[in-house]
Amino acid sequence: MLSGFKSFLMKGNVIDLAVAVVIGAAFGAVVTSIVDGLLTPLIGRIFNAKGIEEMQWEGFMYGSVISAVISFVLVSAAIYFIVIVPMNHMIERRNRRLGITEEEEEVDPQIALLTEIRDSLRSRQN
């Protein structure tokens, strides 16, 4: 029973997931501090408020809703431009260096086998 648990923990997917969670939490703190400390006050000053959250109209605190939406958009943009775009460029450079084109990228053998089985079953039905 313990050997099975050890085998489960030592699989690459579990370790990759653990590393991703830790790095994601740390990166989330950095992005949140950039949004809360720099971008949100800047936008608040544009609209002459101390912060976006303080913006209101006849008692309706619409500023907090706007702040949440802006935070979501800014966090998404930061993740896209700081993580996704550079990773895509690194992958493209690696593929060019190794001579891999999009069509030649590795196909999981299980997916290839399942695709063959599906195609075979389709041809039998016709």
Image (spheres, helix red, strand yellow):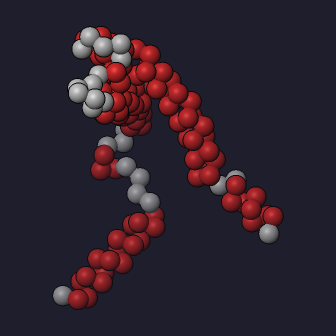
Residue situated in front as seen by the camera: 70 or 79: 70
Hey, which residue is sitting farthest right in the picture?
2
Q: Nearer the viewer, residue 58 or 5?
A: 58
Name the one closer to the observer, 121 or 54: 54
Q: Quadrant of residue 111?
A: bottom left
* Residue that lies at the very extreme toward the left in this rendered image: 126
Residue at x 37% of width, y 49% of height: 105
Answer with left or right where residue 2 lies relative to residue 49.
right
On the question of residue 62 being in view, the answer is no
Spot the residue most to the front.
Answer: 58
On screen, 109 above or below 44?
below
- Could you tell me which quadrant the C terminus lies in? bottom left
Residue at 68% over, 60% down: 8
Query: Where is residue 121 drawn, in percent x and y?
Result: 30, 84
Q: Is residue 40 above or below residue 125?
A: above
Q: Position of residue 22 (x, y in %)?
A: 60, 37
Q: Is residue 126 visible?
A: yes
Query: Residue at 40% across / 57% down in the picture?
Result: 107
Residue 115 lies left or right of residue 13; in this view the side is left
Q: Position of residue 65 (x, y in %)?
A: 31, 33
Looking at the rendered structure, the number of numbered marks drawn on it comes to 0
Q: Is residue 17 above or below residue 81?
A: below
Report the side of 31 relative to 26 (left or right).
left
Query: Is residue 48 found left or right of 8 in the rendered image?
Result: left
Position of the N terminus, as image quadrant, is bottom right
Residue 55 in picture, x, y percent from top left: 29, 22
- Residue plotted at (24% across, 14% down): 47
